[in-house]
Image (tube, rainbow, N blue to C red):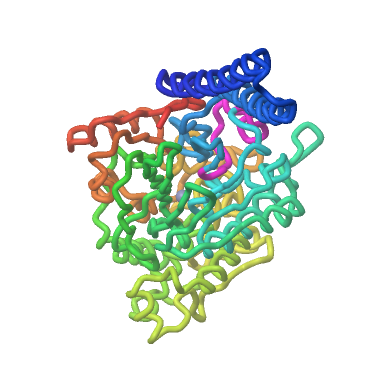
Amino acid sequence: MLFKDDCRIFAASSRYLDLSARCSRGFLGSVTQLLRGGLRRSDALDNAVFLSKHLEALIIQLITNFVSLFISIKMNIKFCGAAREVTGSCHLLTLDNEKKVLLDCGLYQGNEEYMADFNRTWPHFNPSEIDILIVSHAHIDHVGRVPLLVRDGFKGEIYCTHATRSLANIMLLDSAKIQVQESDEEHPPLYNEHDVYVCMKQFVGLNYGRWQQLCEGLKLQFRDAGHILGSATVTLEITKDNGKIVKLGFTADIGRPDRPILNDPVQMPEVDYLICESTYGNREHEDKAAQLNDLLYAVRETCVLNEGKLLIPAFSLGRTQEIVYMLDQLENEGKLPPVPIYIDSPLAISATEVYRMHPECYDEELFNYMSNDPNPFGFSRLHYIREAGLADSLADSKKPCIIISASGMMTAGRVRRHLFHILRKNQNTVLVVGYATPFTLGGKLRNGAKSVFLFGENVPVHAKVKIMDSFSAHGDKFEMYDFIKNQRNAKKVFLVHGEYDVQVQWRDFLQSYGFQSIEIPDLGNEYEL
Ligand SMILES: [Zn+2]
């Protein structure tokens, strides 16, 4: 709750004094005239009506002013998720007119004990108070709590790009399915498939680059963030009570230039306040040009020289399509060894279908590529597997192959069963192509674990574990800086979506490049804008 500043108290008091004076003058004048006998009865009645109207107005004004003195809201931003964390993106913007706009409503995917209730409860706002939800992209840590938000009372519209709307549908259905499968009496699912069906009716797809009026005094523009299909940065143009226009930008997850499939990130217009991600605020990625060759090298080394299996744990959305497109290119160039390739993830299959449906998000290179190969996500030796059981059926086979399976951090999904078999043999390779937090299975393998616990067994890690971080869909510190360098004059930059020690380094880096006022908000922190 925020109190009015002195000027507004003064203005409200002045209005009250002015109206009081006018009514008092009218009342005293009428009484004086009546006493003098100079006022006719009808005039007195007219005056009484006039006075009662003014008194009513006065009372309403008094009540309004009194209430507003204590509950008046000034525009502010509250950080309700992904604050000193990399998941659970959720920020609440409250406008002067008290409209509440939520930026993202993501699932927390970590294991911190103090966050145990985060996904199930709403300590920072009541869902029924939210007027508008804006979703930056379809990763579950940005969209994953939307069905719950709707079930708990949110009735407004959910704005995102067209591709995000399509992807959110499959991502949320998958999330609901997993939750229902893993639930028991003590741990009920956050939501089920019916909740997803209900919430999808509130989604509104918008194009990139167009300004959309969301309500009085609030306009929105999405620009391509180049992170995953449909990902967007959010620019809001807000007209304040005093008529001043304020711009607020939310980078969400910043992609990288020169990535396959997607357009380069499109810089945001200059804003007054910027909410900026920090995932790789202390990192520099490998050279991007090495990627295709590195992938080919890993395939040849594992499948041809060692006659082993190459397992690529990958996020179903984004990473899998990138790798498939790269394999498609290598195949068309005649470089790929003739081994079978399995995409073992129903979600990845659905996501690839959505990728095919949204060519408006492709970059020019892919457009040109498709004039020779209309299907960049498939060729004869590449098999999409919906049915379960591939890992066990391949376990006894000695034939080399490539397997792409989810999840990327190896915390769930079919990849765990593949790991159960593949890690045991030294001719195999696990190619880690994405970030994994240290406590996850992916994180442990990245950090050189000698054995891991899977399906009730300690599984020795005999397979090679290779890391290719250049696949990242997040810009490194130089790429992120390049993307936001036009925002040096922002009144304030809020760093979100990062581990705290990384955020501190990212802040120092930005300060060394001329950024002035940078905050690293903690969960629940609120700032007046
Ligand atoms: Zn993301």
Magenta-drawn stretch contains 110: yes
Q: Vertically, is 27 above or below 248?
A: above
Horizontal side of residue 429 vs 482, given as left or right: right
Of 523 and 11, the residue lying toward us: 11
User: Which residue does the image show at 48% across and 43% down from the upper left?
Assistant: 442
User: Which residue does the image show at 51% across and 44% down from the upper left?
Assistant: 103
User: Which residue does the image show at 43% across and 59% down from the upper left?
Assistant: 211
Of 87 and 347, the residue lying toward us: 87
Q: Vertically, is 400 above or below 132?
A: below
Q: Position of residue 325 (x, y in %)?
A: 42, 70
Q: Position of residue 155 (x, y in %)?
A: 68, 47
Count numbered badges in the picture.
Answer: 0
Magenta-drawn stretch contains 418: no
Q: Residue 102 falls in which quadrant of the image? A: top right
User: Which residue does the image show at 58% across and 63% down from the upper left?
Assistant: 166
Residue situated furthest front in the rendering:
37
Quadrant assignment for the C terminus: top left
Give the main secondary structure of the magenta stretch.
loop
Q: Position of residue 241 (x, y in %)?
A: 45, 37
* Residue extent of the magenta highlight: 103-123
